[in-house]
Image (spheres, helix red, strand yellow):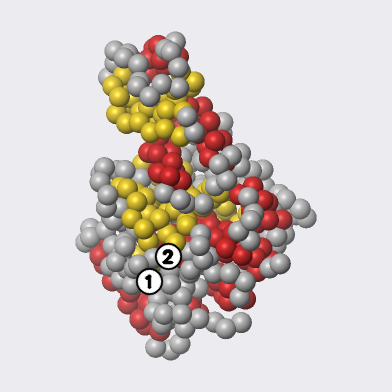
Amino acid sequence: MANRTPRIAASLLVASLLAALGCGQAPAPTAPLARSAADSPARAQAHERAELILASREATPPRVPGATPRAHFAFKGTHYHLLALGQPSWQERLIQALRGQRGTLQVGVNRSWVASEASPAAGAPDDEFWSLQYGPVQKRLPAAWAHARGQGVTVAVVDTGVDLTHPDLQGRVTAGPDLVNQDDDPSDDRGHGTHVAGIIGAASHNGIGIAGVAPACRLLAIKVLDGAGRGDAYLTARGVASAIARGAKIVNLSLGGPAIDSALRGFYADVVKSDVLLVAAAGNDGEAVGFPAALPGVLAVGATDEAGALAPFSNRGANLGVTAPGVGVLSTVPGKLYAQRSGTSMAAPFVAGVAALVWAAKPGLKASELRERLLSSAADRGQPGPDAVYGHGEIDPLAAVAP
């Protein structure tokens, strides 16, 4: 161990230098996930974009002066159209006009969403930095691996993309679309998605780097956030739909925003009914759980530190599902490097990895049953029973995967 600490420190130093030089290898912290619109309407309005989302039965959007079609995807028979406004001040008038069109189900405003990263702060595997991974060590992952390692389960990382060439991820990630640049190369120009991917499924027992929670799972990279870690609600929904179309059973969403309009609530309700588990970061401003984590059926994840205490930045509320390690989490970053990061962005993929372990061990479970198993097997924290601070408790991989 004496020779490992300098090496990881060197990796972290190089990552910091690259970030300072603007190389995009180790990104600076992104803005925290905002609270729900009900808690801060002014703040929610500040995240509105000059775009509308139209949920319709029609594949072709109506021709309404001042609303220009920008993008389209379909899910479960509903068509979701993104329309650009000629002027932001036309918003209410165009919403009313679209509501009167044939096939319209819902009309809402598109909103900016960001990555949910906070400010930095039994047979163990031979991975070089295993002893520095306090979460997997404390949660007895090697014992859980005796039951399953995530084999046969695809977990989608809908994020800033993934470094497909990282030694701990190479050959383990399927390249999905880059919806930001509209191409087929979901490379990571921020580093956030690569860090998330490593937490879920970095290779284990390979003598280098770290070990992911579900080292035998398949990762699917879909890029919906740009190099600044920013995106929007519509693009995220397109990413989720794309992940499901490509066979993902678990979708990790380490991102979010202040609110979500009714035009997309139906989409997420349909996803939850589709036997797909959505795992989402609760957010990092210490307030109410953000979106999409706060939606019914989505598993909202808060962050704890090495001592098991809730991180000060972690959002809370009655719809919080579970908590997981999210402070100083070591994982992969672009450039064959490793870095420690904090945020509910780091806690959510830990839970997504545990979900992959359970589904590999118990493939007959439905997504709703898997979600309930993760909740019911969590180690109770705080007040007895579910509470607004820890949800159902701290995720317990061994208890969740054991017979």
355 or 337, nearer to the observer: 355
Q: Is residue 49 visible?
A: no
Seen at 62% across and 71% down, the residue is: 147
Q: Tell me the kind of residue under disc 1.
A: Asp
Is disc 1 surrounded by few (<14), some (14 to 19) or many (20+) residues within 10 Å?
A: many
Vertical relation: 266 (above or below) 24: above
Is disc 2 surrounded by few (<14), some (14 to 19) or many (20+) residues within 10 Å?
A: many
Point out which mark residue 315 bears.
Answer: none
Q: Single out the residue that lies furthest toward the front.
A: 364
Q: Tell me the kind of residue under disc 2.
A: Gly
Seen at 43% across and 68% down, the residue is: 202
**What residue sits right under mark 2 in the picture?**
198
Vertical relation: 147 (above or below) 101: below
Vertical relation: 26 (above or below) 205: above
**What residue sits right under mark 1 in the picture?**
168
Please state the horizontal and vertical placement of residue 397, each as a whole percent of the image.
62, 66
Callout 1 secondary element: loop
Seen at 44% across and 10% down, the residue is: 100
Please state the horizontal and vertical placement of residue 92, each as a whole percent of the image.
41, 15
Q: Do the residues labelled 1 and 2 touch (CB within 8 Å)?
A: yes
Please state the horizontal and vertical placement of residue 114, each as a whole percent of the image.
40, 45
119 or 203, nearer to the observer: 203
Q: Is residue 369 visible?
A: yes
Callout 2 secondary element: helix
Gap in angstroms between the C-alphas marked 1 and 2: 7 Å
Quarter of the view holding residue 24: bottom left
How many numbered marks, from 0 up? 2
